[in-house]
Image (cartoon, rainbow, N blue to C red):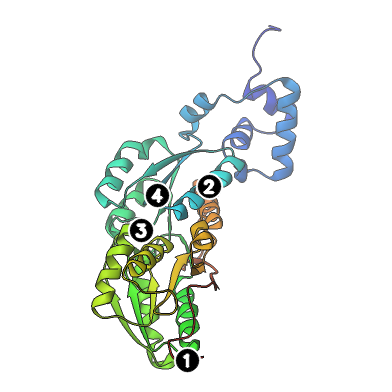
Amino acid sequence: MADRPTTIYDVARAAGVAPSTVSRAFSRPGRVNAETAERIRTVAAELGYRANPQARALSTRTTSMIAVLLADIGNPVFSEVARGAEEAAAEAGYAMVLADTRESAGRERELLDKILQSVDGVLLASSRMSDTAVRQVAKVKPTVVLNREVGGLPSVMVDHGRGMRRAAEHLAALGHKQVTYLAGPEAAWPDGVRWRALRDARTELGITVRRVGPVAPTLNGGVRAAAAWAAHPTSAVVAYNDLVAIGFMRGVQTMGKEVPQDVSVIGFDNTPSAEIVTPGLTTVAAPQRALGSRGVRHVLAFVGGARSSSTEPLLLPTKLVTRASTGPVAGRS
């Protein structure tokens, strides 16, 4: 009898709680009073009890795993989102299944079909699926979306509209009257928010705006955008992201033009490349790592039984980081 493994019932009896409370303390710690959970863990350690993850998954139908789907893992922005998500998952004792959807709604659906039953919750970062498809996922597992607003579902996003407004104000203060927006993928929700914010700022700031694209959210996409911009040049450009902005600068420089003397350029995301490129890129900074960690914490809260008290997205602040790629319009000192 002395060699009998310690069971959950032994721990419950020693801690003075029900076996179900011990089970929740290990499988869903957020559902147990912190003081009680600590007492259970202390007793379990004294008795030599170790929770069996496989048995726990079978008995509670949980896996202690969450899925995080990213639009493009090669993009530095999503790398930061993934890092923040992993840190939050590990802190909660969860493993993370990371999947790269390659900007494809079809691939995103295919991946979810394969992994949905193996995880407790889902975090969709910049999903390219339709609202209907996202809601279908949410019917199966707790789901949170990043940088996207889907009616009725919890979401976390950076304040793209305010970020674009700051960019437009910066250019207007430098005397720029014509601004071109280099648009990102049509399925990218932030792209529409930024374009609307730029258009809304036109009258108050006294600027005219035009749109080029959509273009691929890559360096090559930016190079191609430069050729389209050259057909109807403006004194300033705001790009969908830093990669497009840097590619655009390369493209106009091969045409013999200079940044910012001939065209001022602003990006989005404040990736490491923005600081080391020549000239340094003025860009809208967003807390990408915090975006990932907040998203995972939301998922885990809903996995634990929480209910959303608001349909409004959680907005994280943005700020404009000014560098050498923007300057006064030609002829203005």
- Within 10 angstroms of label 4, few (less than 14), some, or many (20 or more) residues? many
Kind of element beneath mark 1: loop
Residue carrying label 4: 70
Question: Label 3, on which residue?
Answer: 219
Query: Residue shown at 50%/62% (left/top)?
Result: 274
Residue that appears at 49% across and 58% down: 273
Compared to residue 121, the image places residue 11 above or below, namely above
Residue 212: where, in percent of width, then height? 27, 73
The tag earlier along the polypeptide, 1 or 4, is: 4
Residue corresponding to mark 2 = 83
Tag 3–tag 2 contact (CB < 8 Å): no
Q: Nearer the viewer, residue 7 or 138?
A: 138
Give the mark, 2 or 4, whose residue is nearer the N terminus. Answer: 4
Q: Disc 4 or disc 3, which is closer to the eye? A: 3
Q: Where 33 sits versus 282, above or below? A: above
Q: Amino acid at mark 3?
A: Leu
> Of marks 1 and 2, which one's residue comes earlier in the chain?
2
Marks 1/2: CA distance? 44 Å
**Residue 289 horizontal/vertical position (percent):** 54, 54
- Disc 1 marks which amino acid? Arg
Q: Cα distance, mark 3 to mark 2?
A: 23 Å
Q: Quadrant of the N terminus?
A: top right
Kindly indicate the quadrant of the structure image that contains residue 161: bottom left
What residue does disc 1 label? 332
Whichever of callouts 3 and 1 sits on the residue coming sooner in the sequence is 3
